[in-house]
Amino acid sequence: MTQCPTCDAGVTPNALIVGEIFSCPDCGTELEVLGTAPFSVQCAPKEAEDWGE
Amino acid sequence: MSNGFRLGLFYTIVRPEEKALLAAAERRSLAMVRLPDDEMVFGFERGTLEVDGILNRSVSHSRALYAGHYFEHYGIPAINPPDVLERAGDKILASLRLSARGIPTPRTVVALTPESALKALDTIGYPAVLKPPVGSWGRLMAKVNDRESAEQILEHKGALTSPVHSIFYIQEYVPKPDRDLRVFVVGDRVVGAMLRRSESWRTNAARGASVAPLPVTPELAELSLKAADAMGGGILAVDLMEAPGGLVVHEVNPTPEFKALQAATGVDIADTILDYARERWHR
């Protein structure tokens, strides 16, 4: 368990891997997994103009 | 490809696609080395990157392109190679290639200033579609309904600082059904296709379009393979529309997402990509 950097809600790893993006279940902020042991997150990188497929 | 072969995964963020590729590699005991694009530094010296091949999956066109040139410099084969990323990742270059190969596309013009863009829009006719030359997911695209909207949209574009917004890629608005077609090409074959349906004129899955499997007709396969080949081949997602005069290709995506396609078709795209890498690199 760790805290969402935006809303401070508790977030828990659920089959997540390092680098994976997921939404905070409380506020919806996109978070990126920094580590799994211990579990840590940061706000996901902001989408840039040249991002795409 | 598993006997000592080390496959690099160059990426920005781990989306379901990258997660699927990592899982597929693990299933076949293939060493997949993570290469996050925000941590890498590229020098001229060769031999510092200890991988035998790379899947270039960076979501940033610029990062993918420059890194791709370095991979080439290092003698490490990559899918897709930088020339393919360059052509397909830039709508202007892609349109030029499609046109040169005689592949039907929406009528398209390019203008280099807001003033000439206004003239170009008048020429194309309203409604028209204004797209940034680089970028996808339908971001910052505009449907321009009339001259008044054109003037306002161009003024807003002028306020954006990225140089990409000072070049204007203008397309006729194609009166299509509420859907477009996406065909996933791997090498010389089509591995899956889907319909993307939306009430919005933008039918990107990233914008919430619903998807459904699409049977691949010989015409659809032929056109998609030609479009992929025009970019140089590899792993490409070809987007098409059903225009009144027949199918037109409007985009070819060089670092395609496939979560929606995999869900719609049941095809294991990650496995297919690893099979293709194995075939290409003969291990």
Image: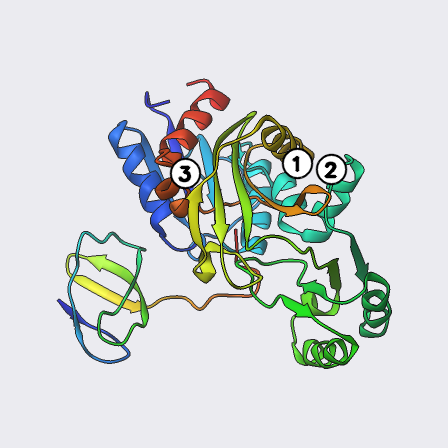
For badge 1, the amino acid type reads: Ala
Give the percent coordinates (x, y) of residue B100: 80, 38
Which of discs 2 and 3 lies nearer the camera? The answer is: 2
Q: Chain of mark 3?
A: B
Quadrant in the rendering for residue B178: bottom right
Could you tell me the amino acid type at mark 2?
Ile
**Label 1 Cα neighbours within 10 Å, binned few <14 / some 14-19 / many ≥20:** many
Q: Mark 2 highlights which residue?
A: B103
Q: Which residue is mark 3?
A: B8
To the question of a shared chain for discs 2 and 1, the answer is yes
In this view, the residue in front, B245 or B43, is B245
* Label 3 crowd (10 A; few <14 / some 14-19 / many >=20): many
Q: Chain of mark 1?
A: B
Q: Which residue is mark 1?
A: B227
Quadrant of the rendered structure where residue B277 is? Answer: top left
Quadrant where the N terminus of chain B is found in the figure:
top left
* The label number, if any, that marks residue B35 in the structure image: none
Question: Which residue: 25% across, 52% down?
Answer: A17
Q: Residue at x 44, y 57 (%)?
A: B38
Q: How far across and how far down the image is residue B32, in percent?
A: 34, 36
Residue B82 located left or right of residue A19: right
- Mark pair 2, 1: CA separation: 7 Å
* Dot 2 and dot 1 residues touching (CB under 8 Å): yes
Give the Cα distance between marks 2 and 3.
Answer: 34 Å
Front-lying residue, B13 or B127: B127
| Image vertical order of residue B147 relative to residue B109, above or below | below
The earlier-in-sequence mark between 2 and 1 is: 2
Q: Quadrant of residue B49?
A: top left
